[in-house]
């Protein structure tokens, strides 16, 4: 039992470090929008499109990468993903064209993120932790991603000011390479075959016929739309409104800092209360926070308060959403099914970041996208109200499926 506890703790620690690096590096991308767009003569749409491709490809590849992690374990997947992430940052730092930006920041980093973030890492954690502690453990690891966002953002800003955007991205690529040795040590154990297991095809059919699964997917679309639009475009929105650049960086850092508390608390609450109901309230509160931010007079103080409030709500959806998938369908195919739900998150991310850049270049402001974000909060709250956590009813099996 002691050896099992040590193994579980190691999975949590290593997974936390990997996800902290992956999410921490990604959280600072919005700081590069203005200097890269200005120096290279792009509109904001070029940068936004590359990050939209990143989010879309991250989502499209996630179910397949998750299935590989379910079958072979997370270690190999994280090593390959970390390598692609580091290469993407390297080539992003050398990019001087829209195509180069799309291939590096979009394709390589998008594929890298699919192997180093929530679906793969939380799948490994879900398999290693007992059901009664699963929501809390997922909250802890998700909070580590939040800590990475907080801790690494000042460093990203410092590198940007010290080295300029190109060399700063090269340095970030070297940091991303640390995920390779960490991933190699992440020896999670895919679930042992039991008589209750089902095949991959059966798991897909089961999820496809489950109404709550699709409602969860649609709800996660809203999460992706909101957080990626805000994470990438908020610095530009504040600068356009006369708020100094260091304030933007501090706001994003506050999002990361308070995200730690919000995500951990969500995981803890998810072990005690209905996860779908918690998600309903979370999305409603998000809508209220965004509305108050837009109607209140804009100042550094109001921006800081917005960062704190959004931070508490930022990744709180992750342990709750993945926890529902585990509760309903079990952990055998958790990374793959969680990856499908995350695909919808990334559809939303693509729309949020791309639409923000497109409408900004078209209209000169972000007003329409902010209003869409508020409306989507109400929609997501309603969707989650009709989700239950009841495990699927599977007929008794006499043998193990391959």
Image (tube, rainbow, N blue to C red):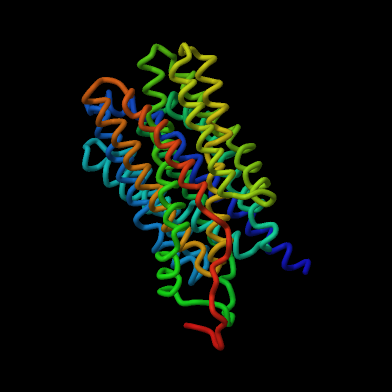
Residue 255 coordinates in the image, percent (x, y): 54, 31
Q: How many marks?
A: 0
Whether residue 370 is visible, yes or no, is: yes
In the rendered image, the residue lying farthest to the right is 2
Horizontal and vertical percent for residue 49?
27, 38
Q: Quadrant of residue 222?
A: top left
The location of residue 271, given as percent across then percent down, is 67, 52
Q: Does residue 182 appear in this view?
A: no
Q: Residue at x 42, y 56 (%)?
A: 214
- Residue at 34% across / 46% down in the picture? 54
Tell me: residue 81, above or below residue 313. Answer: below
Residue shown at the point (56%, 21%) measured from the top left: 305
Q: Quadrant of the N terminus?
A: bottom right
Query: Which is more toward the observer, 42 or 200?
Result: 200
Closest to the observer: 281 or 87?
281
Q: Quadrant of residue 89?
A: top left
Residue 25 in the image, given as x and y percentages of width and height: 47, 40
Answer left or right for 364 relative to 199: left
Judge whether 190 appears above or below 348 on screen: below
Tell me which corner region of the image, top left, top right, bottom left or bottom right, holds residue 358.
Answer: top left
Q: Nearer the viewer, residue 2 or 219?
A: 219
Q: Is residue 129 left or right of residue 37?
A: right
Above or below, 6 relative to 58: below
């Amino acid at each position: 039992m002691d050896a099992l506890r040590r193994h579980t703790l190691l999975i949590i620690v290593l997974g936390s470090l990997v996800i902290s690096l992956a999410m921490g590096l990604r959280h600072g991308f919005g700081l590069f929008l203005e200097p890269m767009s200005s120096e290279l003569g792009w509109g904001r749409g070029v940068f936004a499109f590359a990050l939209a491709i990143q989010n879309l490809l991250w989502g499209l590849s996630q179910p397949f990468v998750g299935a590989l992690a379910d079958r072979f374990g997370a270690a190999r997947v994280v090593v390959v993903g970390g390598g692609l992430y580091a290469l993407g940052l390297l080539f992003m730092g050398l990019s001087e064209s829209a195509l180069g930006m799309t291939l590096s920041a979009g394709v390589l980093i998008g594929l890298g993120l699919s192997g180093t973030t929530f679906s793969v890492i939380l799948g490994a954690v879900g398999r290693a932790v007992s059901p009664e502690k699963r929501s809390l453990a997922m909250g802890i690891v998700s909070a580590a991603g939040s800590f990475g966002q907080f801790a690494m953002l000042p460093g990203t800003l410092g590198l940007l000011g010290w080295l300029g955007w190109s060399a700063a991205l090269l340095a970030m690529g070297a940091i991303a390479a640390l995920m390779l040795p960490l991933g190699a040590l992440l020896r999670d154990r895919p679930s042992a075959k039991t008589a209750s297991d089902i095949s991959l095809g059966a798991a897909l059919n089961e999820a496809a016929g489950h109404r709550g699964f699709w409602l969860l997917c649609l709800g996660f679309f809203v999460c992706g739309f909101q957080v990626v639009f805000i994470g990438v475009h908020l610095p530009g929105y504040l600068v356009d409104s006369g708020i100094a650049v260091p304030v933007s960086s501090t706001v994003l850092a506050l999002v990361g800092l308070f995200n730690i508390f919000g995500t951990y608390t969500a995981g803890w609450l998810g072990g005690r209360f209905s996860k779908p109901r918690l998600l309903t309230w979370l999305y409603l509160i998000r809508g209220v926070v965004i509305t108050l931010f837009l109607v209140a007079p804009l100042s550094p103080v109001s921006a800081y308060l917005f960062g704190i409030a959004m931070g508490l709500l930022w990744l709180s959806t992750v342990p709750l959403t993945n926890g529902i998938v585990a509760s309903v369908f079990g952990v055998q195919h958790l990374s793959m099914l969680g990856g499908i739900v995350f695909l919808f998150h990334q559809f939303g991310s693509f729309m949020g970041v791309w639409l923000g850049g497109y409408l900004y270049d078209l209209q000169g402001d972000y007003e329409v996208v902010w209003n869409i974000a508020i409306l989507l909060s109400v929609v997501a709250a309603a969707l989650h109200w009709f989700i239950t956590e009841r495990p699927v009813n599977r007929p008794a099996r006499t043998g193990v499926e391959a």
